[in-house]
Amino acid sequence: MKTFLVSARFLLVLTLLTGGLYPLLVTGIARVSFPHQAEGSLLNHGTNLVGSALFSQRTTGPTYFWPRPSAGDDGTNYVTVASSASNKGPTAGDWTTNVLQRIDDFRKAHALAPGIPVPADMVFASGSGLDPHISPASARIQLQRVATARKLDAQQRQRLDAEVEARIEPPTLGFLGEPRINVLQLNLAVDAIFKAGSP
Amino acid sequence: MSERDWLQLVIYFGSLTLLTPLLGGWMHRVYSDGSHWLKSILGPIERLLYRLGGCDPTAPMNWRQYAGALLAFNLLGFLVLLGLQLLQHRLPFNPQDLPAVPLELAVNTAMSFMTNTNWQAYSGEAVMSYLTQFAGLTVQNFLSAATGMAVLLALARGLAAREGTSLGNFWADLVRSVLYILLPLSLIFAVVLVSQGVVQTFSPYATVVSLEGSPHSIPLGPAASQIAIKQLGTNGGGFFGANSAHPFENPNPLTNFLEMLAILLLPAGLVNLYGRMVGSRRHGWALYGAMLALLLMTLAIGLAGEFQPNPSFGGLANLEGKETRFGIVNSVLWAGATTAASNGSVNAMHDSLSPLGGLMCLVNLVLGEVVFGGVGAGLYGMLMYVIITVFIAGLMVGRTPEYLGKKIGKTEIIWAMIATLVPFAFLLVFSAIAAVSAPGLASLNNQGPHGLSEILYAFASMVGNNGSAFAGLNANTSFYNNLGTIALCVGRFAVILPALAIAGAMAPKKISPPSSGTFPTDGPMFLVLLVFVVLIVSGLTHFPALTLGPIVEHFLLGRTF
């Protein structure tokens, strides 16, 4: 019985320490030192909150760069609470059909010549369902479609090319992770340069 | 694999090996009674904790007292966490007005976090209030890790003791583990994570309107403080459902590298600490070598599988379930580390790995979580294999087996066999029940051999106190919640109690000086023998089941090797 009493007392004080003091201390430091990051790295579009720099969102219109497919995207909703992955194994038949369809759709939407491969990240869904990035190859392959939809002239097209290249993030410290490009931030930049939605 | 892929692997294992003795040395100072710089700052808090707890931290405990204190403390921790979940709708810090967690899920979750497993049959952002997360789940993240460390310390003291019965004091081990090791590391790590974009706030979820005009929610919460300890304490339970694949848990390659390092940091450091405690740092390195060898073997299988494109889509890289920022190599490395170390956090979805990638994870799980394993738990599990190894070595040369100068007797061998085989029995029997029963099969997200892999993975993960999943399996059903609760409990305490019993049996034994017939436990011969004992014991037990899961699936993809 005494053991239970000592246990209860230790549980209480250690809860206050690790479940009270510790998270509050981290929150305090975060609020003072990194308020933007701690609150979700939210981005404004004009005066509205448009999303988080770390979250992808669905853009399906031809004037925007597209993110990776998401298992949380059922065609009408893009579920962010809770986000999800397909969790399909490599031999799942329904999933294979689905991916082959995506490959086909992507080829058609971008009028890809036979022999030019579709980038893998554009047809496989991410693990978080919220992957904010695409590969540089996926951004470059979408350039022509975006330029055509926005009716850009040759000079503007060059400007768009330069913007995409400038926004490619190399591997961290030169060796960690993969080169990538943030889709929402790219789309916001493109809107800012070429005016929202119109050429 | 590119040069950059290889470079990342080398830097990862290089960093781990360099940090291991540093951390081992630090922990050795913390647990020996001498002074250190952190004690001069936090010493008053340590003494205050003992006073508030109402115990004398120098009072020696024999193995029964030590086990009693541990069980009572864990039982209460379980009950409090259960209560928090059932009452969260009436408690503060619930800005999303989430309802009470259903009973069976709450029991499973409380058991899961108390046993350092963090198996999650729910998505945190949709089910758990902020209060449950930071005052319940975060707390057990710390305390279950500290419990594992305490068991290891007790076992090490029992093995190294010179004819005594004391295994130390559970409360002192608990408090020191939290105050001088887990909390400072977590605090620093959490702040680094926030600086990189991990959220830490009590604000409600943000609502945004996307570029194309559709509104959606951005989930927030006090995540960084929990993520730091879930990585360091081999807990692995995500604040968000997608775990460390979620951009708010793991926003960039740098956080990914640090979180991945944190997975193995303490388990590796504890191996070094153990070597120091039993007076043979070389023995510590031999154990480290055996663990690293096993990890690299399975990692090689995973990398070989994952870098082969799926033949159904021509040459496309396997990116299903993986994040662009991490790429294939970091996803496989994380998967290997997290399944070896009984951490269970994921940065890619294991369900969508190639068959060989999935095989790597499953093999790591069914080895019994002894390849680095859980904080404390991995090493005391491995020590069960060590006892079996020296026993077999003794049989081969016809001498009474000895370990660290102490004779191994019948009692120790029986306990070691219980600790290795009982969890395996539950793993296989529960998987078999699930594979032939309607409620077991109804939860599958994949058919055929991959479905069997989902079942095997679930019970291997729960019995091994790992917590990762082939997450397509719908685990939030009565069947999986209830069987799972039993699996979690057995996997934890069917190893802890034998470990403490062995400590109790070994402590009074005489240490005899090494002779020409002593089997040395600090050299390559021991390392190789230990690796093979682990592989054979687990392999004979699980190979048939693995054959029907990932191995058949590999052939179904039309490959030989």
Image (spheres, rainbow, N blue to C red):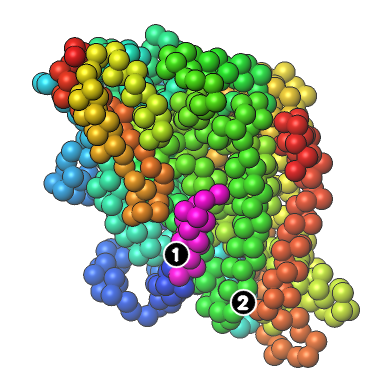
Between A167 and B298, the one nearer to me in the picture:
A167
Amino acid type indicated by mark 2: His
**Which numbered circle lies on residue A111?**
none
Please identify the dominant SS of the magenta region.
helix
Between B38 and B453, the one nearer to me in the picture:
B453
Q: Is residue A92 left or right of residue B192?
A: right
Q: Is residue B561 above or below residue B157?
A: above
Q: Residue at x 67, y 85 (%)?
A: B511
Q: Is residue B17 left or right of residue B485?
A: left
User: Would you say residue A114 is visible in this rendering?
Assistant: yes
Q: Residue at x 38, y 17 (%)?
A: A78
User: Would you say residue B89 is visible in this rendering?
Assistant: no
Query: SS of the residue at dot 2?
Result: helix
* Circle 2 chain: B
- Which residue in the structure is indicated by mark 2? B283
Cα gap from disc 2 to disc 1, whole angstroms: 21 Å
Nearest-to-viewer mark from 2 and 1: 1
Which contiguous range is marked in magenta?
B1-18
Q: Earlier in the sequence, mark 2 or mark 1?
A: 1
Residue A88 image position (x, y, % from top left): 59, 25
Residue B366 image position (x, y, % from top left): 69, 47
Report which quarter residue A135 is drawn in: top left
